[in-house]
Amino acid sequence: MKSDPPSLGSLPVEILCSIFRLLDPIGLISISQTNSKFRTVVQPQRTHLLERLLELECQEEVGGVTPVFRSKDNHLNPDFSSKEWYAMRWACSACLRMLPHTAFDNHSILRLQYRKPLPGSPAASSYTSWEPIRKWKPRKPYHLYKQQSDSRDEDRKIRRRYDLASKWNTLRPNHPVRDRGARLASFQHSGMTTFQGFSLDEYCSITQEEEQVLLDYEARLIEKERCGSRRHLRKCNECRFRRGELSSAM
């Protein structure tokens, strides 16, 4: 009589741990809910539950489409009046719920680092910080993994670079070369890669439209790198009110 093949539950805990470490946040929580043995092995913490929600909000069948916000002209696609917004959901890191946009203020869902990450960006990658054995060096929590390890000065420089790229869409100075030189210097000093090799003569020779193309490219680079990197801190209005972060008059 043939014996039944070994099941996942019959494997030693050490092997189970090696397998569970490879799961994405959704799979990790799902496996922990399968039976008491797996739940004992995983012992999911609040961080792991939040990581699951942050991944779910990026899945269109759960969180809806990912809106794209263009800071330079406040263009939103799809716009607030479209039917897609009724199906969109965002994770609240405090109450661990998936909620509609009406439960948040605009900054909590449209500010660069609080938005849903763009597809293909670092913050959109599946990641779990779960580790089975305490003596092992723990993985970085979600927010430490997603955020850049920049110094405060570097972080300010990136914000300055994004502000220049996304909001400086006014016409360039038309006559004084020194004003254009100052503008080019501000671009280069902020770290914009597309302007690093420009001489003043080369910069003065490009049209307003060509400059805007370069600025849009810089903005997209930063958005792909930074978009969604702080959404683990996003809280709904109700949770912010309960924590005293909103005025009682609101």
Image (tube, rainbow, N blue to C red):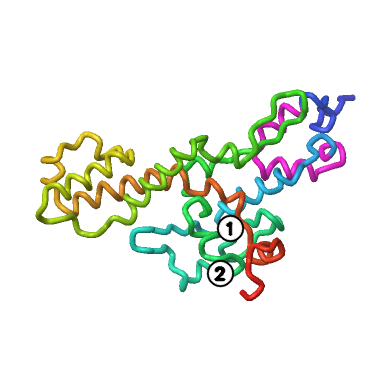
Residue at position x 58%, y 58% from top? 63
Residue at position x 11%, y 52% from top? 176
- SS type, badge 1: helix
- SS type, badge 2: helix
Please say if 184 is above or below 98.
Answer: above
Please say if 59 is above or below 247.
Answer: above
Q: What is the number of the mark on residue 63? A: 1
Q: Which residue is more in the foreground, 138 or 196? A: 196
| Residue closest to the far bottom | 249
In the displayed structure image, the side of residue 162 where residue 206 appears, left or right:
left
Where is residue 152? Give x, y as percent.
49, 40
In the displayed structure image, the side of residue 213 where residue 75 appears, left or right:
right
Q: How many marks?
A: 2
Where is residue 54? Give x, y as percent.
61, 50
The amino acid pointed to by label 1 is Gly
Tell me which secondary structure the magenta stretch mostly adopts. helix
Q: CA distance from mark 1 to mark 2?
A: 10 Å
Mark toward the start of the polypeptide (1 vs 2) = 1
Where is residue 246? Give x, y as percent.
63, 66
Q: Magenta stretch: give its range.
A: 16-39
Q: What is the number of the mark on residue 86? A: 2
Please say if 6 is above or below 164.
Answer: above
The amino acid pointed to by label 2 is Tyr
